[in-house]
Image (cartoon, grey):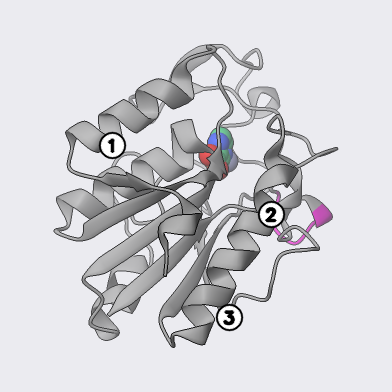
Amino acid sequence: MKALVVVDVQNDFCKGGALAITDADNIISVVNKTIQFFNDNNFLVIGTKDWHPANHKSFAINSNGKIGEIGTLNNLPQIWWPEHCVENTFGSEFHPNLLEIKNVIYKGTDSEIDSYSGFFDNGKLKSTNLFNTLKDNQVSEIYVLGLATDYCVKHTVLDALDLGFKVYVIEDGCKGVNLSPDDSKYAFKEMIKNGAYIIKSDDLT
Ligand code: VGL
Ligand code: ZN
């Protein structure tokens, strides 16, 4: 079985959002085309949501940090982010033009620790339901796209590879934060080095 994992295509990462990624909205048509392809073929479609309580410690304001600087959270290096994807707010909803996704995985729900991967928090202390959902559906190959290339897409892909999945990343369906200008480029390199295949949405037939 094949599964599509749509990573964090939420308002706060899109135009006008609290952690808006440049040109994020340009991926929506690619993401929708890909969702449609997976639906048409009766493959599994899963969406992840970054889903933080308002007191989440990755938010600069809750950790006495400066946005974009690095500190420590739960003994791990942590980038301080603006408040984003607060649970049950407009910012944490999927982009309004995104096709409906029935299977949703929530991550970053523990205020004490950040979670870039759709599978585990950054310290790998707890897991989400993503692995079990994939296992229950006998998924062996996953296709990943969404936001952001250099954080949640990358970490979801690396964990999926670690867990033994064959992983394809749909390049034109991803955009990165790029705190440093080449972060997305290096993210793709790291994913490739660890065994991911980089494809274009048009390669899906
Ligand atoms: C993300 C930064 C903070 C992401 C989530 O979805 O890539 N990035 N929280
Ligand atoms: Zn977050």
Instruction: Report how far apart the C-alphas of labels 2 and 3 lie in the structure.
Output: 17 Å
Do the residues bearing badges 1 and 3 touch, measured as CB atoms within 8 Å?
Answer: no
Expressed as whole percent of the image width and height from the top left, the position of residue 121 reads 37, 47
Q: Is residue 120 visible?
A: no
Snapshot quadrant of residue 101: bottom right
Q: Residue at x 17, y 43 (%)?
A: 195
SS type, badge 1:
helix
* Residue that lies at the very extreme toward the right in this rendered image: 16
Quadrant in the picture for the N terminus: bottom left
Of 4 and 199, which appears nearest the observer?
199
Residue bounds of the magenta highlight: 86-90
Task: Indicate which disc, 1 or 3, sits on the residue closer to the N terminus.
Answer: 3
Task: Indicate which disc, 2 or 3, sits on the residue closer to the N terminus.
Answer: 2
Question: Magenta part mainly helix, strand or loop?
Answer: loop
Q: Residues within 10 Å of mark 2 (few under 14, many from 20)?
A: many
Assess whether residue 172 is covered by the magenta stretch: no
Q: Which residue position is annotated with label 1?
A: 191
Q: Amino acid at mark 3?
A: Lys
Q: Residue at x 46, y 26 (%)?
A: 184
Q: Which mark is residue 102?
A: 3
Q: Which residue position is annotated with label 2?
A: 28
Expressed as whole percent of the image width and height from the top left, the position of residue 9 reads 64, 53
Q: Is residue 134 left or right of residue 68?
A: left
Up-down relation of residue 145 to residue 61 (above or below): below
Task: Indicate which disc, 1 or 2, sits on the residue closer to the N terminus.
Answer: 2
Number of the front mark, 1 or 3 = 1
Q: Is residue 184 visible?
A: yes
Q: Residues within 10 Å of mark 3 (few under 14, many from 20)?
A: few
